[in-house]
Image (spheres, rainbow, N blue to C red):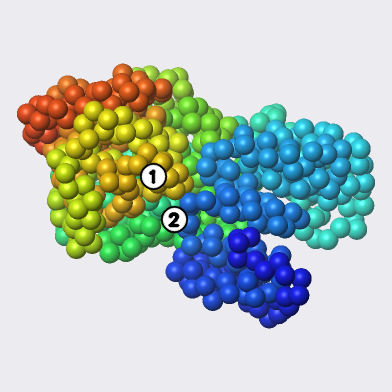
Amino acid sequence: MSDRLNFDAQAPHVPSGLVAEALDASRDVKEPDRAKAAFERLAPALQQYQPDRVFSVSCAMLVEKQRNTDGMLEFWSDLRGLFPDDQTALRMMMRWYRRERRVSSGIAKLHLLFPESHSDVDEAESACLGFAELRAFDEIDRIMDAVLPAYPDARAIRMRYIKILNQQTRYLEAKAVADSVADVDKMGPSSRDLIDTAQRRAAKMALLYSNDAADTFARIIAELPVPERAVGNALGAITFYTGQLGTGGAERQMTRIASAFQAQFQRGQTVGGLALTAPTDVVVKHTTPETGADFYVPVLRRARVMTTSLANVAPVPLDQLKHVTPEVINLLELLPGDVFETTCKLIPHFQERRTQIAYIWQDGGVLFATLAALIAGVPRILTSFRGLPPNLRPNLFRPELPVLYKALAALPHVTFSANSQIAATAYEDWLGLPAGTVIVLPNAMLPVLPDGEPEDATTWDRIVRASADCTQTVLGVFRFDDNKRPLFWIDVAAAHLKRQPDTRFVIVGTGYQFAACRSRIAELGLTDRIFLTGVQENVGFFMHKADLVMHLAQMEGLPNVLIEAQLAGVPVLATPAGGTGEVISDGATGHILPDADAPVAAEVAARLTAMLSDSETLELMGDLAATTAPPRFLLDHILDRTAALFSQTEEASS
């Protein structure tokens, strides 16, 4: 951004009307193409006028809303350096530290920016704003422990801390801070409401004889009756729930299965011998365009699956909830704020829909939707765990989850499922559940066809022309993030090319490390051997061009890309991350490396070279994969198993 700004002292000030236009656009524009158009319309003014904080930050938000990922941390860091007092720039800089999973670096940055935050109330407020974005609540606690006693009359920072404590359901602590705020009667309505809320919730916690608001989940479940089990050869209304509809593998899976059930309903056909008596619907917490959370909305729309975004549903007051007992109403307010709001929106949805089966996806989905389904009396609930549990992925952990899961595990009408055995076992170990409690339901895949669009052929022709002397192709399909290790993937490719230079490497995907990977390839002088295509819709087109798929992730659930490779008849070289061993038959349909945590590039490259040097074995591996993968992973088989789980039949666990 600094390169666009005009620092000439003689330049005129930005007209107030233009500032207002930029501010309105930054607030109102949602779609990336509209954000781009608005930015391009306003950008010339950045160079024409003197730097203006509001105008510059508003334009920066339009860049953010274009769903850019490359260099966004640096972009916001640059802007915050230009306008050090701007809270939006600080928050967005910290948000990108969190998005790039560099929270520790973000914490260090805040300590550098606000070195007096433990003694200066103004620095403390700014630092806490950043720490809250990083969700580094321990850092906030340390600041407050030092600052609040030193500034007994500092009302604003106390109010901020009360809000943060309420958000963490630390109601007793919030009340203690609220009790120290002076002149409450002179505050505005919203501030008084924040104080009243802290005190009211603390009083309810005292009645529960608990200091942990997570216990509320178990207490609510204990208040609810178990609904009668439906009997018959039919499935009623099925509601799918997940957090959002972005480009992730879980979102793709859920969209695919929901669309397939809806298609069978529309055709009047059974699934697993069970009739479908109502259409399928999908509910999500949000489909925010600027974050790409609406990616699969068009797919559901084409499949005629009714999709509800709770972000567009008005909050439902507690006194407007129907058929909910006073005991449960009283407890609901103690839920975390985000869970409380979503629960109150979902209860009427399940009731009005008369949902018979709630299929709830991912840990966040379980946290936000299972209580609502239970309170609404949904007779059958199936959860879907994707990947390893939150105790092994600290960025996903919330203290309410183990309490909720253990209470759910005791209910006869709730079943846990996971898409891999390694994930199922990990959840059972974490929660202390008997083996077999979590049913394994693998990912449902469509046939991986070689079809592509003209632009796919154009991309491939460009790659072939640039590497015309290459005789083999190694493919990678993944996000460019720390877990997938794209830079390491490139290092392995480079090590192999020293031995066997007639191999081309192609990576399909994008992510925040994309620019760094492009630079690494250029530094290695391998732009005619290693190619980055970006995101591609028709992955099967590229799969069928490959001799081998290489996947070097550190952590996985059940990796879709490896299933797709096997369905396409392409052998795989992969780390033993997650459920990889449940997809690949080591030595028969590919090779699994010995280490997922710290593989050595030279050793991986040696294995890759050995595989590519034996074309006959590669072909046999591919043929076996194409034969054995379809019965395990194709959509029709998984739909039948899902229907069996919905109806709680014995076949589901076989």
Residue 571: give x, y in percent of width and height. Answer: 17, 33
Q: Residue at x 56, y 35 (%)?
A: 398
Q: On the rendered structure, is 646 left or right of 613?
A: right
The quarter of the picture where the C terminus appears is top left
Q: Residue at x 21, y 27 (%)?
A: 609
Q: On the rendered structure, is 177 left or right of 653?
A: right
Tell me the mark number nearer the camera, choosing from 1 and 2. 1
Q: Is residue 402 visible?
A: yes
Q: Is residue 339 above or below residue 278?
A: above
Q: Could you say which is closer to the camera, residue 414 or residue 175?
A: 175
Query: For the residue carrying disc 2, how many other residues have a C-alpha within 10 Å: few (<14), some (14-19), or many (20+)?
Result: many
Residue on which the image places disc 2: 293
Q: Residue at x 76, y 75 (%)?
A: 10
Residue 95: give x, y in percent of width and height. Answer: 59, 48
Residue 406: give x, y in percent of width and height. Answer: 48, 28
Q: Could you say which is closer to the camera, residue 356 or residue 431?
A: 431
Q: Could you say which is closer to the camera, residue 640 or residue 426?
A: 426
Residue on which the image places disc 1: 522
Toward which corner of the image does residue 88 lie, by quadrant? bottom right
Q: Could you say which is closer to the camera, residue 236 or residue 456?
A: 456
**What's the CA distance linking mark 1 and mark 2?**
33 Å
Q: Is residue 397 above or below residue 286?
A: above
Q: Residue at x 82, y 33 (%)?
A: 145
Toward which corner of the image does residue 359 lie, by quadrant? top left
Query: For the residue carrying disc 1, how many other residues have a C-alpha within 10 Å: few (<14), some (14-19), or many (20+)?
Result: few
